[in-house]
Image (cartoon, helix red, strand yellow):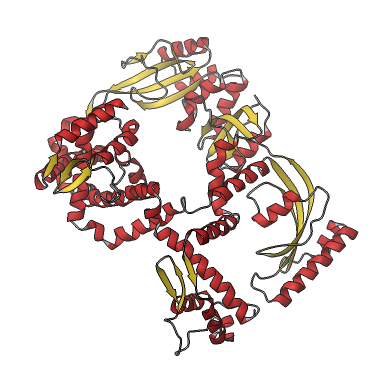
Amino acid sequence: MKIKFLLCFLGVFIAQLSNAQNKEKDILFTIEETPVHASEFIRVYNKNLELVKDESQKDVDGYLELFINYKLKLQEAKTLGLDKKKTYLREFESYKKQLSKNYLTDTKVTNGLVKEAYERMGYEVDASHILVRVDENAIPEDTLKAYDQVLKLRDRVLKEGYKAVQTDVHNGKTIFAEDLGYFSAFKMVYDFENVAFKTNVGEVSQPFRTRFGFHILTVLDKRASRGQVTVAHIMIKDDETKINEIYKRIEQGEDFEALAKQFSEDKSSSSKGGKLKPFSGGELSSRKFEDVAFGLNEKEMSKPFKSEFGWHILKVYEKRQRQALDDVKTQLETKIKRDSRSKLINTSRVNDLKGRYDIVETKAVIPYFTSILNDTYFQGRWSLPESFEGDRPLFKIQDKQFTTKDFGQFLVNSQRQRTGKKPLKSIVEHNYKLFLENELLKYQEENLEYENEEYAQILGEYRDGLLLFDLMETEIWNAAKTDSVALKNYYEENKTRYFFKERIDAVVASSAKKSNIKKVAKLLKEGKDLDEIKLSINTDDKVNVSFTEGIMDEKHQALPKKIKFEKGVSKVHKHNDAYVAVKVKDVLPVTQKTFEETKGKVISDYQASKEENWLKELSEKYAIKVNEKVLTKVKSEIKKQ
């Protein structure tokens, strides 16, 4: 809810930066002596111009009124102390951490990984592998033992063949010998994917290590990926009889797209004849739908089939090998950040920060930690000794000093039970490296707002957006939902605004052939029973006409726009690429809605009314001064754009 609000409210205003960041001196207006600069207003106006639906707000004066109201709300939120609430601060920090991920990366390395992943997504590799499990933190002796074991297994595979070795060694615990089938980029951990794509068909790789242990793999085949497909579909959620009926009509020669417009329950695509945006393998949330789509040829249509979302008939328009890199770049970047490839980005980022920041290390202190560490560390029970010297300087990043106390606590927190013991000196050196890298990354994140102007602006959006959400929830939304007495009073005072428009109780007959509808219209006029009509018109296992029954308003999907709301049988109309006739059994007049029938609309209207009155109170509570001279200047600048 809050994220949606932040993205949608008033087109997402950009929050104001600190006065020190604002180079423009022109103050457009003040609220209680708090300045709002002309540069901020122009930036926000330009950013949100296309998002504002009310034409009056595209006028500078109209938009200024909207912007002043926005700033009034922020002023009130701060007066109420909402910016000091623990829940607000906690949520803001969470958003901040999430947002910073987009800016804390190495662009050059990321772009290289994107290009590599894109090239690999054009292919699929069929492979088998053998894995000898070994813990990442195993002692050298166990690591060497696992390596020797997988090396011997490779020799056996070369001599005996993979299948013979698989049957003999796979136990599903310490050794795995598995057929993986076809896979492409991002389906395996990056180290495994690298070897798979770099090994030739028919070859057995050299042993390599992932976090699971040591592997060898045999590449059985490589082929082009399934690419991209464009399809249309007709979806009926839970009525197998109806989807089969529609399928028969298509087989009888009726237009697929016309039937999609009439009957498909996928509202996002029905008006387009069922057509969907192009997609690649793995993009949809239904594997069944994808498999059917990729299994068809261009211009081919599927039989009815069921997915997790309902029953479908699918028609293929176009099949392409893959999208252009620019079209999928953002998606690939997101996948890379979640993938083990991200380690390469982090390593590059750390190296960059080491060159950017002034780092002073006191490495002579490091042996001290080897002297106080003991075997309880491997059992997860080690603690700092009472005589621990925690105030000795360890390293400094810019002006931020880190001491032995900081690293000592890092060691305490990083210990855990281990299956094998490593030399204490190695453990200290490894953890010191991790600690320094972690603190470098943290330092960059903590100072990102001062180093990156774009990030600072977007962070401001979240900061004020969250604050505004809390204010509106407290002052308007919750009050409107929970004050039942006020809601009912509002309903009674505005009762004439809430009513059902004129509706009809009707039967709509639809067919691709006008002659069929003429026959149905005649039978309806004769007063024939609907079941009787269906039996007479849909003969020989053919569905010539479909029927829709119920209470309908003028916007109902099945009704022609020119239909008259009067009892009787209508003339034949052309509607949604088909012919229809309507039998109006009854006309339901304009009817007053009860409070319960229109409660949602009443709440919405009451909120709008309450907010309007509240804004009037705020404008009287806080002193607002607009600099007309600067406003004239702003209008002139915007006009020149």
Side of 625 relative to 20 (left or right): left
Name the residue located 59 percent from the left edge and 72 percent from the top edge. Answer: 430
317 versus 470 height, above or below? above
Q: Residue at x 60, y 34 (%)?
A: 324
- Does 542 sit above or below residue 619? above
* Viewer-nearest residue: 521 or 335: 335
Using residue 429 as the reference point, say whether residue 413 is left or right of it.
left
Percent coordinates x, y for residue 83 in the rendering: 25, 57
Q: Nearer the viewer, residue 242 or 379?
A: 379
Q: In this view of the protein, can residue 305 be seen by the observer? A: yes
Q: Give the x, y percent position of residue 280.
A: 60, 38
Residue 260, horizontal then vertical, whole percent:
51, 25
Please say if 23 is above or below 82.
Answer: above
Visible residue check, residue 1: no
* Quarter location, residue 81: bottom left
Q: Quadrant of the C terminus?
A: top left
**Along the viewing direction, whichever of 584 and 66 lies nearer the viewer:** 66
